[in-house]
Each structure stands twice: as C-alpha cells, then as structure tokens.
C-alpha cells in the first residue's frame, strides 16, 4: 500500500496479537501463523505485532523483526500491519523502525521513551519523534501507556507532536475518557487517535477517536468489530449493548490478569495463547475457570 492508502485505512479495531512460545521458550511461528490466519479477513482494521499484549519488552529485536516478516505473509491490504518499534534511545528506535519497514510493516507504533522519565519533557519528546518520523518511509504513531511507562504525556505535548511531519496518530492507553477528550481538542485535524482501553471504546468513538487497539480482539474479535461497525452505522443501542458485553471481559480478564489472562482466554477460544515469557507467570487453574465463565457470559445469545 502507498502511504495514502495506509492513512485511509488506519481506523477500526486493531488486534495486538499475542506471541506464542514453544516449550523451549522460543517464538512458535507455526502457532503465530495460525492465530493470524484466524484473525484476518473478519473486519479488523489490522494487526499490531510486538505490542504490549505481544510481550514486546521481552522480545529480542530479531524476534520482533521476524514476527513482522511472518505477519506480512498473512496480513493483506486493506488490513494494516503495525509494528511496535519503540526503544529507549532515538537511534535504536530509528534503526529498529527502518528494519521493520524493510520487512513489511505498514506503520510504526513508537512507545514513549521513559527510563529517564524526569527528562522526557515536551522538547525531548518532540526531538525524539521528529527524528524517528523523518527517518522512515512509513507513518509513525505515538504510543502512550502511562500505567506501564510511568510517563504521562500532557495533551498540549501530544498536540505539538501531532503537527510533526509523518507523525499521523496516537495509541492512547490510559483508559481516561477526559484525557482523550482533552487530546482530541488539541491535535491537528486528521490526526488519528486509537484508544487501548475497552472501557472507553464506544465513548471515545463518539469523541472523535477512529478506533482502538484492544487485547480482547485476540479472543473476542466479533464483539469488538461489531461495536465499531454499529457505531459507523449509527446503531447506538447495538453499540452500547456490545460495549456492555465487552466491559466484563476487560474487568475480569485483561484488567486483573494482563497478558496471562488474555493468553488463557485465547486458549479457551481455540487459538494459541500458551505460556507467557518469564518473569510473567500464567494464571492459575481457578482463574482460568473464571475466565471461561466470563467468556460464556459475554457471548450469551449471540452468534459471534
């Protein structure tokens, strides 16, 4: 796809795909392929490889790049292939981003640097994203997830970042609707905001967000896509119903149990979640039963 094609299709629900591991602890490419094959062609806007749900902090750079290569074989236009390429230094981020583009990434999701968070003021972040975005041939999205990074980027700073050439969007994962509203007021027209919290998915769409990146899409893609489609078709009652079905999944699976809970749900739905990579630990058998019950409740009476 051309850059314009990518921008036109950068909307909807994106699945931050889990990374399955084999018994030796390496990436299981076969299971990764199977998971992607089940997720493509069902209405998702695209896939995110090496995101937080994909355990990006625990992946070597070569593993991230290999996942992009494999995903590129399966994810076809108009679905977008996003790759997480944010590292701590600007140069390392630029190098990884260029390699990801060379292997087929359509767009890049760049996590905010956060180790020296006290020094990551507006000027530092602008310098970082300007350099990365200018050095790659694909669109760049900012990734803000303060509950993990400890770095809260003010809406005014996001507004400045939105005006940098080739910085086209934001994945905002704080889960705070008021913050999303403030961001929407300050960014340039056409800047694409995706949220990372199912709890505010519908309300964020109403505020001008173009979609979401949802871990729940790994195991409940029909519900996620259905909500977005209902919103687009102005079927507010249906969209609210789907939001209410999704909320307990976030509250009972992704929220309290994180990646391990999502992987357990993926297993229960017939795909390949498997073990998390240490030091993350899997959920207990009792928690898995609770997750199974939540999945049954969310899909009760539905064909999706």
Image (cartoon, helix red, strand yellow):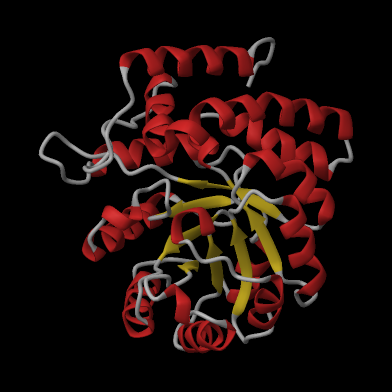
Residue 84 position, x and y percent, is 42, 62
Tell me which corner region of the image, top left, top right, bottom left or bottom right, holds residue 289: top left
Q: Quadrant of the N terminus?
A: bottom right
Residue 198 position, x and y percent, is 64, 40
Q: Quadrant of the C terminus?
A: top right
Give the side of residue 218 with respect to residue 222, left or right. left
Q: Depth check: give the residue in front, 134 or 259.
A: 259
Residue 78 position, x and y percent, is 59, 56
Residue 265 position, x and y percent, is 43, 25
Q: Residue at x 33, y 42 (%)?
A: 33
Q: Residue farthest to the front?
A: 118
Instruction: Look at the image and tell me whether residue 180 can be seen.
Output: yes
Tell me which corner region of the image, top left, top right, bottom left or bottom right, holds residue 34: top left
Q: Residue at x 32, y 41 (%)?
A: 32
Instruction: Look at the image and tell me whether residue 13 can be seen.
Output: no
Q: Residue at x 69, y 10 (%)?
A: 301
Give the side of residue 144 with respect to residue 224, left or right. left
* Number of numbered callouts drawn: 0
Q: Residue at x 69, y 84 (%)?
A: 163
Against 98, is 298 above or below?
above
Against 18, is 269 above or below?
above
Against 299, is 259 above or below?
below
């Amino acid at each position: 796809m051309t850059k314009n094609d990518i921008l036109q299709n950068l909307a909807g629900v994106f699945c931050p795909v889990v990374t399955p591991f084999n018994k030796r602890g390496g990436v299981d490419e076969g299971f990764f392929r199977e998971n992607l094959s089940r997720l493509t062609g069902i209405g998702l806007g695209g896939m995110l490889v090496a995101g937080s749900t994909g355990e990006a902090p625990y992946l070597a750079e070569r593993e991230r790049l290999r996942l992009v290569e494999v995903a590129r074989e399966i994810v076809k236009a108009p679905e977008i292939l996003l790759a997480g390429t944010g590292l701590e230094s600007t140069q390392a981020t630029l190098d990884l981003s260029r390699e990801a583009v060379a292997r087929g990434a359509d767009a890049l999701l760049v996590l905010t640097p956060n180790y020296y968070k006290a020094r990551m003021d507006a000027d530092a972040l602008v310098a970082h994203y300007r350099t990365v975005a200018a050095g790659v041939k694909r669109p760049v999205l900012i990734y803000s997830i303060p509950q993990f990074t400890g770095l809260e980027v003010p809406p005014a700073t996001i507004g400045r970042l939105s005006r940098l050439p080739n910085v086209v969007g934001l994945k905002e994962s704080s889960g705070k609707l008021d913050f999303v509203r403030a961001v929407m007021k300050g960014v340039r027209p056409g800047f694409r905001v995706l949220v990372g919290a199912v709890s505010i998915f519908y309300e964020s769409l109403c505020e001008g967000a173009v979609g979401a990146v949802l871990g729940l899409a790994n195991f409940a893609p029909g519900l996620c896509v259905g909500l977005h489609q209902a919103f687009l078709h102005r079927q507010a009652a249906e969209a609210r119903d789907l939001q209410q079905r999704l909320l307990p999944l976030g509250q009972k699976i992704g929220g309290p149990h994180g990646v391990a809970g999502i992987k357990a749900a993926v297993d229960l739905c017939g795909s390949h979640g498997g073990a998390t990579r240490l030091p993350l630990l899997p959920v207990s058998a009792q928690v898995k039963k609770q997750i199974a019950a939540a999945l049954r409740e969310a899909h009760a009476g539905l064909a999706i």
